[in-house]
Image (tube, grey):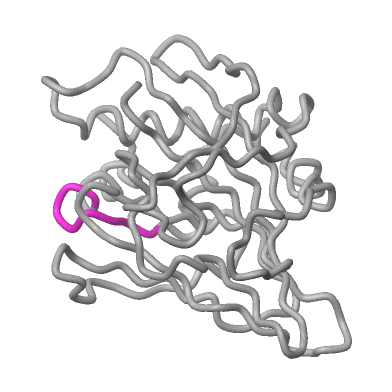
Amino acid sequence: MPAPDLSAIEARLRDDGFAWAASGTVRTLLPATALEGWPEFAASWNDLGVDTYMADGGRYRRRRFSAFEVSADVIRRKPHQPHYQSRDYNPLNGGIERWFLPITDPIAGSTVLQSILRLGFSIFHPLTPVASRPASWHVECHQFRIEAREGEHGKPTPEGLHRDGVDWVLVMLVTRENVAEGVTSIHGPARQLLGRFTLTEPLDTAFVDDGRVYHGVTPVVPIDPDRPAFRDVFVVTYRRA
């Protein structure tokens, strides 16, 4: 029998197309070794490159990116590759290959990252219909830092309400520093609002059925404009290879 917390997440995803889990719940779903390595994992967000592909001209987003193959038995890092979305899914920045700095080897091989990938697999794989369930998943990992400054709000989803063009999405908060807002909203096929929540604590996590619902996040704004302000998240997408 799956753990009760895991069962609740699966039920929400099955019924509503999304689920939100607080950090306390997520801690019970990760091994102790992953939690021990969390400080080093979170600190790696201080070493991201500026996203130079922002069609709105903004320089408020930093990131690293890597792809993996994930199955019941294997987590294998794939050769470094570009991130690509069609303009159907990302009208702002899509339609081109976007090359970002890779996730560093120590972080890619860390117990934290690998445990998060296994957590996503353990939830998403059983929820995928058997007829379309792959033996292994193409998984893309994004380290995002959204910075906010006086006069320039940080946009976690500059493309607006959207789908990512994958099967499943996991969004885990790493850090919120001196920012307000950043409210996540989930919408149905007709763009009707289904739910709103804010990731506020490290390990707060959203799970999304990308084929069924749209999602978006409001811009983050600095609380104290004289101090650094940013929102760090780890985004993991699962797509049938």
* Nearer to the camera, 158 or 127: 158
* Nearer to the camera, 207 or 93: 93
Q: Is residue 146 left or right of residue 91?
A: right
For residue 178, which quarter of the picture?
bottom right
Q: Read off the magenta span.
A: 13-20
Q: Residue at x 44, y 47 (%)?
A: 170
Whether residue 170 is situated above or below residue 72 in the rendered picture: below
* Number of marks: 0
Whether residue 88 is situated above or below residue 67 in the rendered picture: below
Residue 50: x and y in percent read 77, 55
Residue ranking furthest to the right: 226
Q: Residue at x 60, y 65 (%)?
A: 201
For residue 35, which quarter of the picture?
top right
Residue 180: x and y in percent read 62, 83
Whether residue 219 is situated above or below residue 106 in the rendered picture: below
Q: Residue at x 65, y 34 (%)?
A: 112
| Quadrant (top left/top right/bottom left/bottom right) for the C terminus | top left
Q: Residue at x 35, y 31 (%)?
A: 239
For residue 3, which quarter of the picture?
top left
Residue 190: x and y in percent read 14, 69
* Nearer to the camera, 56 or 169: 56
Q: Is residue 203 left or right of residue 231?
A: left
